Amino acid sequence: MATVIIPTPLRKFTGNSSRIQVSASKVSGVLDELAAHYPELKKHLRNADGVVPSFINIFVGDDDIRVLEQEHTSVSENTIISIVPAIAGGINHLTA
Amino acid sequence: MNLEEIQLSREELIRYNRHIIIPEFGLDAQKKLKAAKVLVIGAGGLGSPLLLYLAAAGVGTIGIVDFDVVEDSNLQRQVLFGVDEIGQPKAEAAKQRLKSLNPYIQIEVHNIQLNAGNALPLVQKYDVIADGTDNFPTRYLVNDACVLLGKPNVYASILQFEGQVSVFNYRDSTGELGPNYRDMYATAPPPGLVPNCAEGGVLGVLPGIIGSLQALEVIKVITGIGEILNGRLFNFDALSFQSRLFNIRRSPDNPLNGVAPTIHALIDYEQFCGVKVLETPIKEITASELHDWQRRGEDFQLIDVREPNEYSAQNINALLMPLGTVTDNVDKIDRNRKVVVHCKAGSRSSKAVRELEASFGFDNLYSLKGGIDAYVQVVGTELS
């Protein structure tokens, strides 16, 4: 089973699970599997057109699927798949 | 850069001894730090350790961009400041702290909100930019300004328990240019999808860790030592203590410097990030009008949304309700008579009124224009 690492901002949609085992053999199947188990997560992984939004990066191992074979990228038994969303924190803006 | 022309005084040689004796660092790297000009954008959670370490390390000129004032709720993570600085502009307070740490460096204060109109001339004056802001429009603004002007952008970002660090737009020794923020994230998430720290929170020690890593990369970019975090994204999860390093590459679709660039100047970043909202007008009252109300015995409630220490320093007998606690104390706000909300200068009270109107349906609120500062100016002599 491949392992998906869920980033902290999205863990509220996975019952706080940070690592999820998946059995799919391609990234597209991994995303489908996640969406089936965690319906709330779905809108964060695919936009209205059904593709991964550009503010979410999916890495298979160390590499972005955009430079691999996009959602057709294969995953195997020991693959680590990381979901890395854009975050913008730094200073607290609710001041002045 | 001719390192022969850069001299370190005897005091500086003593101060930086622990750098200079590292064989891979040495006197030359210390001179490069002295000659360098670094612009730090945001003197907040990330900016605190970043500024402290850059100043301590002897970066010769440090520019600080921030338009906020220090608040009590900042002190949970913004270790640059103390209780005495509450209410002061952050950039100015940071300068005083850094000058006491290192008198051998120059600090430039830019007490402004960075925008498309002022970013380019400011960024142009510096060698390295360190971005520690808290919102997507400024992230893209800083990125684009750096790419348009050919400046390296040392990036760090945090949220809750997670941090990211990378070095963007870095030209290596072979002349090859690395990726930038738009290669990593072509667009910002729609507003509301990913919270910022003010909404989502952040563990105070996390910016300490990530801001220190950012300082490390700034020093490496300046001195050229080690492997720069160029073309790689460092990701840290404080909860699992897992750190990962991902490869990022330049995208041919990058609108700034891909195969067919479409952006040649700074744009409207709030519009780009979908956060442009027309702020609804709110009712305001001037200090003179408020004073008139008081003199003729008008029936109204007065609320102060500043912090307790500001209130202790000076108040006008208002009900204290710090901005961060307003929504938890809605039941204490009168709905059946006029309510005047005030802060130091009018910004926090406007936010409070807007929030109370939007989320709780108030229609009897007035924000004191110019805050207690304006009030004191108008009626100062009559204040008890």
Image (spheres, grey):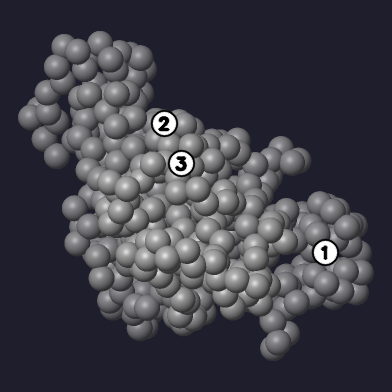
Q: Are marks 1 and 3 on the same chain?
A: no
Q: Position of residue A76 (x, y in %)?
A: 83, 60
The residue to which callout 1 is attached is A13
Give the Cα separation between the discs numbered 1 and 3: 40 Å
Q: Secondary structure at mark 2?
A: helix
Does residue B146 appear left or right of residue A77 in this picture?
left
Label ID, residue A51? none
The earlier-in-sequence mark between 2 and 3 is: 2
Number of the front mark, 2 or 1:
2
Task: Name the spot of residue A17 as percent of width and height, x first.
Answer: 86, 53
Left or right position of B206 against B311: right
Query: What residue sits 29% from the left and 17% below the top?
Result: B16
- Residue in the picture at 16% in, 20% down: B8
Dot 3 amino acid type: Glu
Q: Are marks 2 and 3 on the same chain?
A: yes
Q: Amino acid at mark 1?
A: Phe
How far across and how far down the image is residue A95, in percent?
48, 54
Q: Residue at x 16, y 11 (%)?
A: B10
